Amino acid sequence: MIGNPDFLTGRGQDQAPEFQELDSPEGELHLRFYVSSGDEFALPATGIREVISPSPDRITPIPNVSPLLLGTLNVRGRVIWVADLGQFLGDSTPLSTDRPEISVIAVEDQDTMLGLAVDRIVGMEWLDVEEVQMPSNVPDSMAPFLRGEWFLKEEKGRFLRLLDQVAILRSARWAA
Protein backbone atom coordinates (compact mmCIF):
# COMPACT_ATOMS: atom_id res chain seq x y z
CA MET A 1 0.00 0.00 0.00
CA ILE A 2 2.58 2.58 1.07
CA GLY A 3 5.00 1.46 -1.63
CA ASN A 4 2.36 2.22 -4.26
CA PRO A 5 3.19 5.57 -5.95
CA ASP A 6 -0.53 6.34 -6.33
CA PHE A 7 -0.85 6.30 -2.53
CA LEU A 8 1.69 9.13 -2.18
CA THR A 9 0.09 11.33 -4.83
CA GLY A 10 -3.50 10.59 -3.87
CA ARG A 11 -4.37 9.48 -7.44
CA GLY A 12 -5.95 6.22 -8.36
CA GLN A 13 -5.90 4.51 -11.77
CA ASP A 14 -9.13 6.21 -12.80
CA GLN A 15 -8.10 9.79 -11.88
CA ALA A 16 -6.35 12.15 -14.25
CA PRO A 17 -3.37 14.11 -12.93
CA GLU A 18 -4.31 17.49 -11.54
CA PHE A 19 -2.03 20.46 -11.93
CA GLN A 20 -2.72 23.65 -10.11
CA GLU A 21 -1.09 26.73 -11.49
CA LEU A 22 0.16 29.01 -8.73
CA ASP A 23 0.19 32.71 -9.40
CA SER A 24 3.74 33.87 -9.17
CA PRO A 25 3.84 37.20 -7.33
CA GLU A 26 5.25 40.21 -9.11
CA GLY A 27 7.91 42.27 -7.38
CA GLU A 28 9.20 41.93 -3.84
CA LEU A 29 7.46 41.36 -0.53
CA HIS A 30 6.96 44.50 1.61
CA LEU A 31 5.29 45.39 4.90
CA ARG A 32 2.83 48.29 4.59
CA PHE A 33 2.01 50.49 7.59
CA TYR A 34 0.88 53.95 8.71
CA VAL A 35 2.49 56.48 11.05
CA SER A 36 0.50 58.88 13.28
CA SER A 37 0.16 61.58 10.61
CA GLY A 38 -1.72 59.17 8.31
CA ASP A 39 1.16 58.79 5.83
CA GLU A 40 1.63 55.26 4.50
CA PHE A 41 5.05 53.62 4.19
CA ALA A 42 6.56 50.28 3.23
CA LEU A 43 9.67 48.38 4.26
CA PRO A 44 11.20 45.46 2.34
CA ALA A 45 10.44 42.18 4.12
CA THR A 46 14.10 41.18 3.80
CA GLY A 47 15.10 43.99 6.19
CA ILE A 48 12.57 43.17 8.89
CA ARG A 49 13.56 40.89 11.75
CA GLU A 50 10.04 40.59 13.19
CA VAL A 51 6.84 42.46 13.98
CA ILE A 52 5.65 42.54 17.57
CA SER A 53 2.73 44.15 19.38
CA PRO A 54 3.70 44.68 23.02
CA SER A 55 1.57 46.50 25.54
CA PRO A 56 2.91 50.01 26.25
CA ASP A 57 3.92 49.04 29.80
CA ARG A 58 6.47 46.55 28.37
CA ILE A 59 8.40 49.49 26.84
CA THR A 60 10.67 50.88 29.55
CA PRO A 61 11.22 54.66 29.26
CA ILE A 62 14.86 55.72 29.58
CA PRO A 63 15.66 59.24 30.88
CA ASN A 64 18.02 61.66 29.12
CA VAL A 65 17.84 60.09 25.65
CA SER A 66 16.58 61.41 22.33
CA PRO A 67 12.87 62.35 22.46
CA LEU A 68 12.45 60.13 19.38
CA LEU A 69 13.04 57.07 21.54
CA LEU A 70 10.09 55.65 23.49
CA GLY A 71 12.35 53.37 25.54
CA THR A 72 13.61 49.81 25.50
CA LEU A 73 11.86 46.50 25.00
CA ASN A 74 13.03 43.05 26.04
CA VAL A 75 12.42 40.62 23.17
CA ARG A 76 13.33 37.06 24.18
CA GLY A 77 16.26 38.27 26.29
CA ARG A 78 17.51 40.86 23.81
CA VAL A 79 17.02 44.51 24.70
CA ILE A 80 16.12 46.73 21.74
CA TRP A 81 15.46 50.44 21.54
CA VAL A 82 11.98 51.44 20.36
CA ALA A 83 11.56 54.67 18.41
CA ASP A 84 8.55 56.64 17.20
CA LEU A 85 9.09 56.29 13.43
CA GLY A 86 6.65 59.09 12.58
CA GLN A 87 8.49 61.63 14.73
CA PHE A 88 11.83 60.38 13.41
CA LEU A 89 10.61 61.15 9.88
CA GLY A 90 9.52 64.66 10.90
CA ASP A 91 5.89 64.27 11.97
CA SER A 92 4.79 66.70 14.65
CA THR A 93 2.17 64.24 15.94
CA PRO A 94 3.65 61.82 18.48
CA LEU A 95 2.54 58.22 18.50
CA SER A 96 -0.29 57.62 20.97
CA THR A 97 0.76 55.08 23.58
CA ASP A 98 -2.68 55.16 25.19
CA ARG A 99 -3.81 51.85 23.66
CA PRO A 100 -3.65 48.16 24.49
CA GLU A 101 -0.82 47.36 22.03
CA ILE A 102 1.79 49.26 20.03
CA SER A 103 2.86 47.92 16.64
CA VAL A 104 6.66 47.64 16.57
CA ILE A 105 8.65 46.66 13.48
CA ALA A 106 12.08 45.32 14.47
CA VAL A 107 14.64 46.08 11.75
CA GLU A 108 18.20 44.83 11.81
CA ASP A 109 21.46 45.53 10.02
CA GLN A 110 24.56 43.60 11.01
CA ASP A 111 24.33 43.44 14.82
CA THR A 112 22.20 46.55 15.30
CA MET A 113 18.46 46.13 15.90
CA LEU A 114 15.90 48.89 16.36
CA GLY A 115 12.16 48.74 16.99
CA LEU A 116 10.15 51.19 14.89
CA ALA A 117 6.84 52.00 16.57
CA VAL A 118 4.09 52.78 14.05
CA ASP A 119 0.40 53.71 14.26
CA ARG A 120 -0.96 50.63 12.49
CA ILE A 121 0.19 47.85 10.21
CA VAL A 122 -1.70 47.14 6.99
CA GLY A 123 0.00 43.83 6.15
CA MET A 124 2.36 42.19 3.70
CA GLU A 125 2.09 42.87 -0.02
CA TRP A 126 4.03 42.08 -3.17
CA LEU A 127 5.08 45.41 -4.72
CA ASP A 128 6.80 45.93 -8.05
CA VAL A 129 10.05 47.77 -7.33
CA GLU A 130 10.32 48.60 -11.04
CA GLU A 131 7.42 51.04 -10.53
CA VAL A 132 9.14 52.98 -7.72
CA GLN A 133 9.57 56.63 -8.64
CA MET A 134 11.87 59.22 -7.15
CA PRO A 135 10.11 60.90 -4.24
CA SER A 136 8.52 64.24 -4.98
CA ASN A 137 7.46 66.93 -2.57
CA VAL A 138 8.80 65.23 0.56
CA PRO A 139 10.02 67.05 3.68
CA ASP A 140 13.79 67.44 4.01
CA SER A 141 13.62 65.54 7.31
CA MET A 142 12.27 62.47 5.48
CA ALA A 143 14.20 62.55 2.17
CA PRO A 144 17.44 60.82 3.34
CA PHE A 145 15.46 57.77 4.47
CA LEU A 146 13.41 57.17 1.31
CA ARG A 147 14.28 54.85 -1.57
CA GLY A 148 11.30 56.06 -3.62
CA GLU A 149 7.53 56.00 -3.73
CA TRP A 150 4.60 54.40 -5.49
CA PHE A 151 1.67 56.53 -6.63
CA LEU A 152 -1.53 54.90 -5.35
CA LYS A 153 -3.94 55.02 -8.28
CA GLU A 154 -6.94 53.98 -6.19
CA GLU A 155 -6.38 56.85 -3.75
CA LYS A 156 -6.04 60.16 -5.54
CA GLY A 157 -3.03 62.16 -4.44
CA ARG A 158 -1.70 59.46 -2.07
CA PHE A 159 1.72 57.87 -2.12
CA LEU A 160 3.18 54.73 -0.61
CA ARG A 161 6.73 55.63 0.36
CA LEU A 162 9.49 53.03 0.46
CA LEU A 163 11.83 53.43 3.42
CA ASP A 164 15.51 52.49 3.67
CA GLN A 165 15.85 50.71 7.02
CA VAL A 166 19.67 50.75 6.91
CA ALA A 167 19.70 54.56 6.54
CA ILE A 168 17.29 54.80 9.48
CA LEU A 169 19.43 52.53 11.67
CA ARG A 170 22.64 54.40 10.87
CA SER A 171 21.20 57.89 11.24
CA ALA A 172 22.97 60.46 13.38
CA ARG A 173 19.55 61.61 14.66
CA TRP A 174 19.61 58.93 17.35
CA ALA A 175 22.43 60.75 19.15
CA ALA A 176 20.42 63.97 19.43
Image: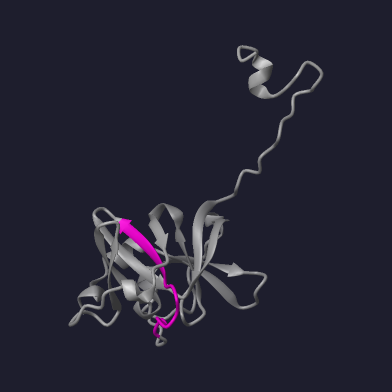
The residue segment tinted magenta is 94-108
113 or 91, nearer to the observer: 113
Vertical side of 34 occupied by 49: above or below? above
Q: In which quarter of the image is the N terminus?
A: top right
Q: Does the magenta stretch include residue 112?
A: no
Q: In this view, does 1 lie above or below 67?
A: above
Q: Residue furthest bottom?
A: 92
Front-most of residues 160 and 37: 37
Magenta part mainly helix, strand or loop?
loop
Q: Quadrant of residue 93?
A: bottom left
> Which quadrant of the view contains residue 48?
bottom left
Q: Is residue 21 left or right of residue 41?
A: right
Question: Residue at horizontal 40%, vertical 87%?
Answer: 92
Q: Residue at x 40, y 81 (%)?
A: 97
Q: Is residue 102 highlighted in magenta? A: yes
- The quadrant of the picture occupied by the C terminus is bottom left
Please give the name of the residue rendered at 48% of the width and 82% of the height, measured from the top-left corner.
37
Q: Picture coordinates of residue 78 (x, y %)?
A: 25, 58
* Whole-percent x, y for residue 139 in the image: 42, 81
- For the image, the number of numbered tags is 0
The picture quadrant where one finds residue 130 is bottom right
